[in-house]
Each structure stands twice: as C-alpha cells, then as structure tokens.
Amino acid sequence: CREDLVRLAGGGSDFVAVTFTGSGTAAVEAVLCSAVPREGALLIVDNGVYGRRMVQIAKAHGIPAEVIRLDNTTAVNPGDVEARLSARPELSHVALVHHETTTGLLNPVPAVVEVAAHHGRGVILDAMSSLFGEPLDVGQDGLDFAVASANKCLQGIPGVAFVLCRRSAVEELKGREPRSVYLDLYSHYAAQEQDNTPFTPAVQVFHALRQALAELEAEGVEARIKRYSENARVLREGMARLGFEILVPEGARSSILTTFRLLPGLTYEALHDQMKRRGYVIYAGQGEIRNVAFRVSNMGTLTPADLEDAVAAFEASLVELGIQRRVP
C-alpha cells in the first residue's frame, strides 16, 4: 500500500508513505508533534474547524504557535504568510489545511508552499479531503508532509491515515526526543521501512485500503478529479435554480463539498428530515454557521446523474415544506 500511495499521489522517489491505524487527526498530530523541533515554532493557518484543531494540537504538546486567523469563508493570503515568516525566524514550519470541509474552502497551497520554500521553511499540509480529489502537486519543493486518510477521496473506509513524507524531512527526525510514543512519526517510518509496525495495525482496514487503491488505479486520479468537478457543477447549477446561494466565494471553492445558505423560512432540521425520507443525508454547517447553512458532499462513487437526482430531491422537499423558491 505504501508504494502505491506515493505513486498515485505523484510523490516520486523523494517521498515515502507512513501509515497509521487511527483517524486522520492521529496522523496530523503525529506530524505536528514530531516535525517541529524543540527550539522551533509553528505558523498555523486557521480558517476552519480543522485549522483550529491544529492550534489545539500544538497547544497540547507545548509547541509555540503563531496563528493567522481568518473567517471560515476566507482563504489565506500568501502575502500574510510571507510577512509572518519574515518577522519570525524561529517559525520552522507552516501548517495549513488544503480543503476545509467546514465550508468547502480551498486554500492556495501552491502559493503558500512557494513562499515557505523561499524562506527555507517546511510545509505541513492537511490534505485529508483533497488528495486524489483536487489537483495537488505533492512533490512541490517545500511541501515536506502531506496528511490524508483512506475514507475521503480515496473512497476507502475509516481507520487508516497516512503521511506522504519527503524522505529527507522524515530522516531529519532520527534521534530526536519524541513528544509522543504512539504518534512518533519517525518510529513508524523506521519500522515500516523494515516491513514491520511498532504497534498492532487494523489489518482488515488495510485490506480495504488496498482495494480502494486498486479502484483508484482503475479509474485514474485525473479522471476521479474530473468526475468530482462535474458532480460539483451539476449540484451547484441545480441548487442555484432552486434559489440556494453558496457560502464560499467563487475562486476559493473545492469540487468536493459545497456549503449552501438556508433559504428564508427554511430550517436545517426540516430540510434534513425531508431529504432523509428521500434517501439522502445532508450535514449542518459547523460552528457559527450551523443555523444558517448546510453542507453537501459529492465525493465517493457518485456520478453527475446521481447529483441531478439529489437536486430533484431538494426541489421536492421544498415543495412539501411550502418554501418559495428564490430564483437569483
């Protein structure tokens, strides 16, 4: 599985995959608590729930962190990253989320990585819900660690997460005093390089990961990205006809998840129940947008025809609820 993960992600010979039995957060925490040296500090981009989780992880491990705080619909400005790195030489790494599923926001990863590389800093990227679903140059100079899991765009099941590591970056961790036992990135890397594991793996989930990789190989990474993009187009055009507005500005939207504003007079609970009766599950907005928005994802084996059916279900739900469509 490790070799296939690197190959399909386009990492090349400079990269190696390190797997963890655990959720995606386990792998994110492993990188944060392992990669930042004792004398170093983190620059974290916080524009969603998962950026804030990185802040929580850093605090729990006593890692000094400077935080660029933005609202949940605003992508980071690479110029702000440049300014912080210029002002604080002790910031050894930049940590950010590529695709914030809080809202469906995409951060401009290539530009941020370029800035970090110019300043000689490494980037730790949470690519949990973007790898294999959005264009991502894993091998870009400066991107040292990209974290993802089996159960997002890879279309596997939960329980396995992995880190695509630049080999030189993970080798630098050798001999460093770990902040964690189970989540020490280097110990997992060293054991896996010897075809071993430091702890008991979830074998059944790795078998599912192998199958998911085979299915990705059969479809093709570019084809999957294209299918997700077409799914998103069909969904968004259909929802626009029903009067729904997208929370995230155009140009910062992913092709994987969309957050729509609730129509006047429509509650999330009422819409959720109507859609569930029709065989669909929608998610509430996270955090402060919970009562004003809802989320729809189009990842997985869905096709554009499936999204057309979903739009029809939304329309039927509005009719039954007596909600007047607001056509832009």
Image: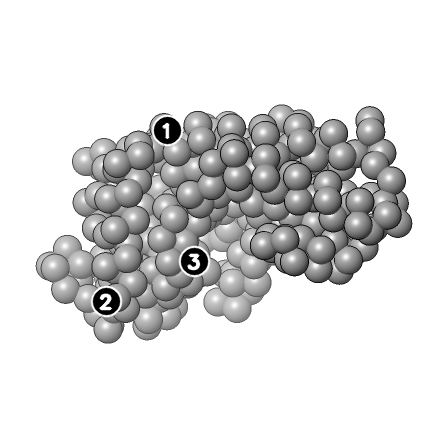
Q: Is residue 152 above or below residue 245?
A: below
Q: Which residue is mark 2?
A: 203
193 vs 153: above or below: below
Q: Quadrant of the C terminus?
A: top right
Q: Residue 174 is drawn in which quadrant?
A: bottom left
Does the CB distance between marks 3 and 2 fall below 8 Å?
Answer: no
Q: Is residue 173 visible?
A: no
Residue position for label 3: 24
Which residue occupies 52% across, 61% down? 58
The amino acid marked with disc number 1 is Ala
Q: Earlier in the sequence, mark 3 or mark 2?
A: 3
Residue 323 can be seen, yes or no: yes
Q: Could you tell me the amino acid type at mark 2?
A: Val
Whether pointer 1 and pointer 2 mark residues with C-beta atoms closer than 8 Å, the reply is no
Tell me which residue sits at (23%, 34%) in the image: 12
In this orientation, which residue lies closer to the viewer: 319 or 198?
A: 319
Give the labeled residue for mark 1.
223
